[in-house]
Image (tube, coloured by chain):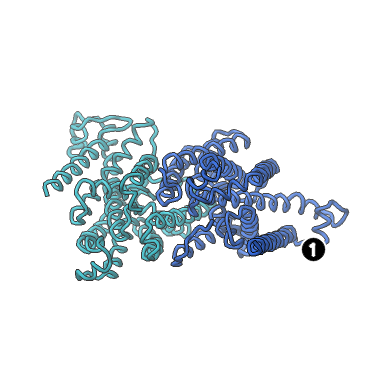
């Protein structure tokens, strides 16, 4: 009894430490994001700009008009993607089943671009992205066969991702050059042109999802057992899976709609969060990791790359994430990949 | 034996039918005798000059490009599947074509021009991507779980595609041209380009053919292959050369195309068994037939416009891959 209590306490402490550390990292990165740039601002000016105090005249515009929206978009999109990835990976019990690998993000992109090319407004584009994400997710799960925790399911997802890329290619060849240009710009994944509508939408979906998951988190813990055990414990694994897939698709779709498909954040945040937290599913940690990753990648892209060229954040996360994935695959790890 | 002969005959007939369809069908259907006349005797008096132009300037070049690129991808797919012991390996799926494509765009942006120099850059890109895949495929963890290789390949492809798109963003003229090429099309290269690159493909095919017995031995496992007297490392190295030459040049010809290698090699294996002596040439023929059929379908679906062959292959090939994975074959993954 004492041992169990001690273990629980240690686990809670670890959770608090990890969360506090990640929040601290986020705060530091946020301050850097607000201070650095073509017009470097000192801390006093940043605070003045944020609060609208009478300080150096341009700093309010720079901070609130330019840097803050970009910061918010990066953090929210990163958190949404991190949460989406960790949720799907844990509910399907498959570390490779992440929305950017099994075609959900690609479906959202393809549908979003198709709508963008009809000239409809951003609400319709978001609606298109959501539809595309749900269609891709349904296809992956309906066609994936029984073993969703296995490798076969992932390959089915990859096939759907390539199919979505084909559809996307079709849309891009039918568009006018100007439209194709903006579509390509969006497709490389960038937080460079934030709109408050997008930010608001991602924030709303993220908060609602977080609330929902907080309410049902016990059900998610039981999900980590196989279906028979879960049912014996009174849970409803299929309903939980379907619900999780819908939530993942929504999160992915609004994130992709706001900032384009930012590669690998969904895939990597879950395992990193679980590694830090020590046990799964570590959804909150994954969201914080995702937010920090996108923000850090955006800062790297803006300030570290020499010259005036700024690679979009999707390329930075793509390069780093691909490296992480390849290193993970190359390491001969005998331990079981997913620990409940 | 008889079954293999029958299988070979089916593939050859399918390819002939695909060639005929590619030459005769389209927004302007042209009957076969007119096609033959246009090719052989273009000065024939009763020949409609428009038909002659369509056949000679449009259909023949794209048919030849389709034959060469499709065959190259089919053979490359069979070699990849043999050397990685992975039944769903494909040069497009594993990032080799994306590597070649990225290299071409980089080459263009730094001023490389001309068919052969661009093809050389494509080969470099294919080599880099193949090297990464080769290193990964050799790790025991991935050798035991072929699906992981596909995930790695899709990650590499995604990264390279995004880098390619980024490069194109800075040059709207290039963007306009290559958004049609990067989906995979048989119309981007002229006949003289195709004929200039044919020798490279031939070399790749010869290297692959010489590897047939080594690939058969590798299929039994590294140790068995060594015991049978085949150098595992040299065989793998030469397989890499063949894959790079074939897939890199195919990408230089027709842009990055997925699934043709996978489906072509799979069909060939179903029809004629796993022996690479028969499998490699039949994969080539099957790949060529598939690409031509896809191109023809793309012309027929939305006349007078057309859907590029690469898009048709992506849309039709994905269900085939899914079907493969769900079948008994998928149990091996």
Of all chains, the one bearing label 1 is: A
Q: Colour of chain B?
A: cyan
Residue at figure coordinates x 33%, y 35% from the top left: B297
How far across and how far down the image is residue A256, in percent?
58, 45
Is A263 displayed left or right of B329 in the figure? right
As helix, strand or loop, the secondary structure at mark 1 comes to loop
Q: Residues within 10 Å of mark 1 (few under 14, many from 20)?
A: some
Q: Quadrant of residue A305?
A: bottom right
Nearest the viewer among B163 and A309 is B163
Q: Colour of chain A?
A: blue
Is B297 displayed left or right of A325 in the figure? left
Residue ID for mark 1: A42
Nearest the viewer among B188 and B42 is B188
Is B276 displayed left or right of A321 in the figure? left
How far across and how far down the image is residue A307, in percent?
62, 63
Nearest the viewer among A195 and A206 is A206
- Could you tell me if residue A67 is visible in this image? yes
- A199, above or below B216, in the image: above
How many badges with numbers are in the image? 1
How far across and how far down the image is residue A288, in percent?
65, 56
- B65, above or below B197, in the image: above
- A246, above or below A306, in the image: above
Residue furthest right as drawn: A54
How far across and how far down the image is residue B136, in percent?
40, 63
Residue at figure coordinates x 25%, y 35% from the top left: B21
Residue furthest front as drawn: A1
Nearest the viewer among A203 and B10 is A203
- Could you tell me if residue B192 is visible in this image? no
């Amino acid at each position: 009894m004492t041992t169990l209590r001690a273990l629980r306490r240690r686990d809670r402490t670890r959770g608090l430490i990890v969360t506090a550390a990640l929040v601290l990292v986020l705060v530091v990165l946020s301050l850097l994001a607000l201070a650095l740039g073509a017009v470097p601002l000192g801390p006093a000016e940043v605070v003045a700009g944020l609060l609208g105090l009478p300080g150096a005249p341009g700093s309010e515009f720079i901070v609130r008009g330019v840097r803050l929206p970009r910061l918010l978009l990066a953090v929210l999109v990163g958190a949404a993607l991190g949460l989406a990835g960790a949720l799907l990976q844990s509910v399907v019990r498959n570390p490779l089943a992440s929305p950017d690998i099994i075609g959900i993000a690609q479906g959202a992109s393809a549908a979003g671009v198709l709508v963008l090319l009809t000239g409809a407004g951003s609400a319709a584009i978001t609606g298109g992205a959501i539809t595309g994400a749900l269609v891709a997710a349904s296809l992956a799960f309906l066609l994936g066969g029984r073993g969703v925790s296995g490798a076969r399911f992932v390959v089915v997802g990859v096939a759907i991702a390539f199919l979505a890329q084909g559809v996307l290619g079709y849309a891009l060849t039918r568009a006018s050059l100007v439209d194709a240009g903006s579509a390509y710009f969006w497709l490389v994944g960038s937080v460079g042109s934030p709109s408050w509508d997008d930010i608001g939408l991602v924030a709303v979906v993220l908060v609602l999802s977080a609330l929902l998951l907080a309410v049902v988190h016990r059900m998610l813990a039981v999900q980590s057992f196989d279906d028979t055990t879960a049912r014996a414990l009174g849970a409803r694994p299929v309903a939980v899976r379907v619900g999780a897939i819908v939530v993942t698709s929504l999160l992915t779709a609004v994130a992709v709609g706001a900032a384009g498909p930012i590669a690998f954040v969904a895939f990597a945040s879950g395992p990193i969060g679980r590694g830090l937290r020590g046990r799964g599913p570590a959804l909150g940690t994954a969201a914080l990791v995702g937010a920090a990753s996108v923000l850090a990648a955006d800062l790297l892209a803006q300030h570290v790359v020499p010259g005036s060229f700024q690679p979009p954040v999707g390329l930075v996360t793509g390069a780093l994430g691909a490296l992480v994935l390849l290193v993970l695959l190359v390491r001969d790890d005998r331990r079981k990949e997913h620990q409940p | 034996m008889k079954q293999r002969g029958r299988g070979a005959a089916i593939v050859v007939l399918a390819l002939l039918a695909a060639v005929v369809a590619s030459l005769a069908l389209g927004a302007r259907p042209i009957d076969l005798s007119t096609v033959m006349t246009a090719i052989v005797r273009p000065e024939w008096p009763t020949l409609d000059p428009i038909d002659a132009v369509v056949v000679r300037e449009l259909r023949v070049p794209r048919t030849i490009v389709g034959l060469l690129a499709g065959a190259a991808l089919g053979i490359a797919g069979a070699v990849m599947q043999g050397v990685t012991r992975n039944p769903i390996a494909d040069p497009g799926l594993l990032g080799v074509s994306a590597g070649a494509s990225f290299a071409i765009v980089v080459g263009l942006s730094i001023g490389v021009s001309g068919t052969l120099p661009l093809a050389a850059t494509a080969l470099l890109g294919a080599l880099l991507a193949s090297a990464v895949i080769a290193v990964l495929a050799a790790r025991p963890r991935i050798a035991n779980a072929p699906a992981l290789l596909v995930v790695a390949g899709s990650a590499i492809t995604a990264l390279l595609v995004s880098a390619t798109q980024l490069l194109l963003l800075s040059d709207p003229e290039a963007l306009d041209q290559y958004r049609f090429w990067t989906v995979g099309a048989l119309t981007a290269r002229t006949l003289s380009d195709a004929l200039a690159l044919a020798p490279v493909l031939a070399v790749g095919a010869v290297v692959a053919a010489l590897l047939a017995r080594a690939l058969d031995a590798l299929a039994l496992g590294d140790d068995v292959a060594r015991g049978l007297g085949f150098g595992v490392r040299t065989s793998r190295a030469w397989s890499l050369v063949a894959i790079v030459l074939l897939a890199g040049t195919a990408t230089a010809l027709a842009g990055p195309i997925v699934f043709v290698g996978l489906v072509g090699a799979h069909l060939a294996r179903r029809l004629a068994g796993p022996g690479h002596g028969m499998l490699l040439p039949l994969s080539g023929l099957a790949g060529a037939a598939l690409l031509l059929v896809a191109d023809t379908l793309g012309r027929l679906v939305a006349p007078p416009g057309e859907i590029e062959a690469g898009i048709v292959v992506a849309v039709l090939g994905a269900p085939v891959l899914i079907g493969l994975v769900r079948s008994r074959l998928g149990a091996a993954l």
